[in-house]
Image (cartoon, rainbow, N blue to C red):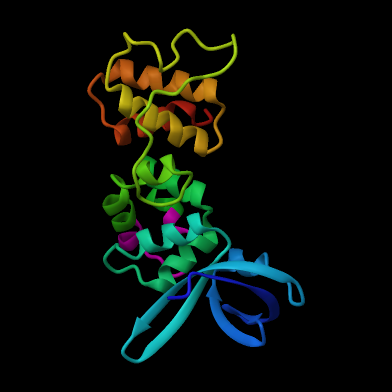
């Protein structure tokens, strides 16, 4: 199985690039976002996923292994094939996709070309419990999330930081939620405060529920 290619971008097509690796040209199908980052005549490193069927063999390329893992996750959803997955990843960054799924924002997924409302809702519904693990790994896809309580550095630690032992809820769930939010780009202190507030309102909340509540609290107010 081909997992990564490093070579010269020989040319670009509407939905693919030709990567020359040691004189061998690989046709790699890419999202619009990935294609925009590839320039003919330059060196590129592409993470790949191979689709093999009885009548077809295709390589799909991604700029990061995290994006490739999200592609794998998306294609586990009924009705989402490689084409739909590439459309979604071409429209949303992995961070935006994780946020949309955690918040139940199927409208953002619907913005991808060729993705109808029913399919967008199915993506959100089927992946909502897997998104927190993916977010906890920096968008890398489902996997074991950190279970240790975070240790904010420096004297400016908020008094309601998640390492306080008397906080309600599961410390592991709070740590995972905090990791997910910081991987999405939120400052550790504001993320910690939002997660602590969510845990205070729902002491037995799961990681997914904590993330959803914290994201709603952090969302810009109109």
Image-based side of 144 in relation to 60, left or right: left
Q: Is residue 112 visible?
A: no
Q: Nearer the viewer, residue 208 or 157?
A: 157
Q: Quadrant of the C terminus?
A: top right
Against 114, residue 63 (above or below) is above
Q: Is residue 134 magenta?
A: no
Q: Which residues are magenta?
A: 109-120
Q: Nearer the viewer, residue 66 or 195?
A: 66
Q: Nearer the viewer, residue 112 or 172?
A: 172
> Furthest residue to the left?
204
Against 138, residue 70 (above or below) is below
Image-quadrant location for residue 21: bottom right
Q: Is residue 129 visible?
A: yes
Image-quadrant location for residue 34: bottom right
Q: Quadrant of the N terminus?
A: bottom left
Against 135, residue 76 (above or below) is below
What is the x, y in percent for residue 22? 66, 83
Which residue is rendered at x = 74% and y = 76% of the image? 40
């Amino acid at each position: 199985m081909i997992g990564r290619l490093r070579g010269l971008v020989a040319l670009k097509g509407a939905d693919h690039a030709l990567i020359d690796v040691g004189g061998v040209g690989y046709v790699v199908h890419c999202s619009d976002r990935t294609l925009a980052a590839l320039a003919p005549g330059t060196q590129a490193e592409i993470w790949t996923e191979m689709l093999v069927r009885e009548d077809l063999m295709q390589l799909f390329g991604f700029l990061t292994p995290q994006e490739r893992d999200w592609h794998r996750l998306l294609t586990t959803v009924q009705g989402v094939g490689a084409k739909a997955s590439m459309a979604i990843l071409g429209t949303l960054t992995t961070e935006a996709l994780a946020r949309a799924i955690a918040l139940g924002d199927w409208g953002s997924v619907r913005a991808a070309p060729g993705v109808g409302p029913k399919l967008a809702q199915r993506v959100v519904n089927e992946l909502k419990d897997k998104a927190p693990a993916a977010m906890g790994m920096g968008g890398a896809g489902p996997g074991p999330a950190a279970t240790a309580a975070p240790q904010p550095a420096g004297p400016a630690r908020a008094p309601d930081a998640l390492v306080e032992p008397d906080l309600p809820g599961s410390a592991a769930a709070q740590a995972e939620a905090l990791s997910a939010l910081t991987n999405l780009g939120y400052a550790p202190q504001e993320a910690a405060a939002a997660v602590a507030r969510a845990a205070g309102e729902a002491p037995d909340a799961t990681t997914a529920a904590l993330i959803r509540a914290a994201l709603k609290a952090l969302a810009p107010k109109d």
